[in-house]
Amino acid sequence: MSFWTLLYDLFTYGILAFSVAILCFYIFIAIYSIGETRNYIRKSTFADYRILAASEHAPSLSILAPAYNEAATIVENVRSLLNIYYNNFEVIIINDGSKDDSLQKLIDVYDLEKVLYFTEQPIATKPIRGIYKSRNPVYKKLLVVDKVNGGKADALNVGINMAKNKYVVCIDVDCILEQDAMLKLTKPFLENGEARVIATGGVVRIANSCEVEDGKIVKVNLPKQFLPRMQTLEYIRAFLLGRMAWSRMNGLLLISGAFGAFDREIVIKVGGYDHSTVGEDMELVVRMRRYMEEQKLPYQVAYIPDPLCWTEAPASFKILGRQRNRWTRGTIETLRMHRKMFFNPTYGVLGLVSYPYWFFFEFMAPLIEFIGFLGFCVLACLGLMDWNFFFALLLFIYTFAAVFSAFAILMEVMTYNQYKKKREIVSLMLTALIEPVLFHPFVVWAAVKGNIDLLRKKKSWGEMSRQGFAAKKAAA
Amino acid sequence: MNLFVNSIVPTAWLLLAARVLTLAVAAILLFVFLFLLQNKRKKKRKAQLRVLFSDLIAEITIAENRPELQETLQAFASPKGRKQLLANGYARKILINELVKTKENISGQSAGNLCWLYEELGLRQDCFRAFRTGKWYRKVRAMQQLAAMQQNDYLVKIYRETNNKNSFIRTAAQLAVVKLTGFKGLRFLSIVSHPVSQWQQLSLLSHLQEGEVEAGMIRLWLSKKNESVVEFALRLVEIYKCHDLHNEVVNSLRHDSAAIRLQALQALREIYTDNTAEALLQAYPLLNRPEQLAIVAMLPEVGGSENALRFLTTLVQGEDEGLCFHAMHAIQQISPAWSSQVIHQLKTNPSFIPILTHLQKEAV
């Protein structure tokens, strides 16, 4: 056997083994998530959330919302946060050195005055320029912190330092919350058995094309634009199947930065968000889990499959590319920081399953896919391609992807059924057929670019301009 | 490319698998639409039944005596097909749900009338049958319904489930017995070996009425090994202000569990006596920082003796900025004169300046 034949064998068998492994894992995730979703839905029908909403003894929450150049929507977004359905909470808006008039708008509308506020600094942050509270008692739950720009992670750390309560809820200021979002997010912390719940996260849904009124979603529509619709399907798959399965095995590594709640004590013990990575949301969860494993403390990261939070998805390839590029860099940075856990039995499920999964199937998959594509081009150019086999394999993979998406749609319909019109279901199914051809290659390319940018030591978040809900409604 | 891979997975197999998967997509699509269609029909049927039964329930609630109740029920059952409807399993389920929902919002004679209807139509037997099944969610639903409809006959059977190993059954049974018998229902705390979660504690509290608390029982629970029971007992002490249990609560400050120690401090805030401050100062060195902070914050409330002021002054002079701030805050609340003295001593200390400025601003 010549060297080239051996290399060729390794390449083909390697890619085959990887593909079989990833397909098996997808099948496992789909099946494993069913039981957890069914159990959750049954369980939640017996829960009376009014008890928590009305109770003086409900745990107190500090809602942290970092804001950077959000002047267009900040006033309404803060109003929406102040109106959430919960009893014991404070809202901390952290103005992360905005260059626009976000702060002035808040001062004017909420009648804020600068107060001298002593606070402990368990986590080191960029300097605070001022702390503002309202003169109007109606807004007594609002605290605005103005600080020197230091990025989202630094802003959240300031919020964590300022927070007075046991649990902190980190939220993107432009997210729209469901009425009972806080109640559902808080409940797992109170269901503590042997294991301490250190973090909870909920489903983030895509709000493009939805009708929004007074900071609330009044009508859910499937996005009309191509890219947000693709992402809707992607989110359904990820949140309803993927995270549900990970939650069942207590192996969840990621709580969306858009909406998650954390045990403040543990967050402080691990040193808060790390601002050296662009994937600070994932990194914090991994670090908290690692800390609990190293301390040998029983713990749990809980996940709520109810749609709790709605956000606007990128509608252009440019913005989407930046987002996926950043997600890739964040994943790699996190995996690199915690490489000690790779197949390390000391870390249990975290080291033996979660970390390797993220390494092989989140970090490596786009690279292997890309290399496979290059290999295909070379073989095709050299005339070594068996086209019959190639098309059969392509067809198999395509139909597998379609079945997986169709199954996710089925789960969505049988559980939360957000998209009620038949034509929306048909549209989602068509999306499932188009996605592997048009959307997926772009996502792979963005991930490859993320790898390249990381090698070039690019650290930026990339600008994430949004269309805004109000503007969209007017357009509709 | 087919040299090796094709030898393991022949092309024909792949094509066959692709065909099967294509059929699977079509089958899922078909299933989705059938599911939606069935769901729509179910919803329509449910809405019709709810309208029908809400009329019956409305009339039953305003009936004044037994003959009137019988008459209303007969009038409802007389049209053709109604008897069959009342025998239909799905319709009976809807009726039970409607009865329970209405019963939760009313009391007095009207509530009694609903219980009569529930018993008269044999709906409680339906619930009991569900209670006896192996499926946890049916059992839980049945217990909730039996408790809502005040079916005390089943109390013993439900009580047996209060220490069930299935947490859903256990918690539903605990809530049901409290709903049926009030504070007395909490006697399961004496035998429960599983944790009573914070969520469950809040749920139990929401069903308790003021004035029915027995300090003797709480004293017993304070000595239990189950930490969550002790925590809940301390919560009861706090809410119902059980002053007789002061000494037991003070003893809980030495408990191994941090959650219990914190809850004990919260309880002491409500039942403090002249001796509380001294007990807190004695316990202080043995506690963790969160509990120490809680003690400093509650000293102005529970009694600011000179001893306490001296203790707080030592904290102000310490290195922990947070404790220093809270101690200074407490001193200011207990004795402005003492506070001025401390400020005078420390005003040249640069690390003290932010705290001082904050307190001055707050005082304004």
Image (tube, coloured by chain):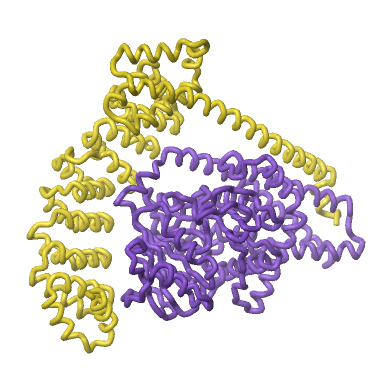
Residue A45: which quarter of the image? Answer: top left
Residue B212: which quarter of the image? Answer: top left
Of residue A422 and residue B2, the one placed in the foreground of this image is A422
- Residue furthest right as drawn: A383
Q: What x and y, as percent, mark residue B3?
A: 86, 55
Q: Is residue A400 above or below residue A127?
A: above
The answer to whether any part of residue A393 appears in the image is yes
| Count of numbered marks | 0
Q: Is residue B211 above or below residue A171?
A: above
Chain drawn in yellow = B
Chain drawn in purple = A
Residue B164: which quarter of the image? Answer: top left
Residue at horizontal 46%, vertical 21%? B92
The answer to whether any part of residue A356 appears in the image is no
Image-based side of A86 in relation to A202, left or right: left
Of residue A288 and residue B322, the one placed in the foreground of this image is B322
Residue at horizontal 72%, vertical 58%? A440
Image quadrant containing the N terminus of chain B: bottom right
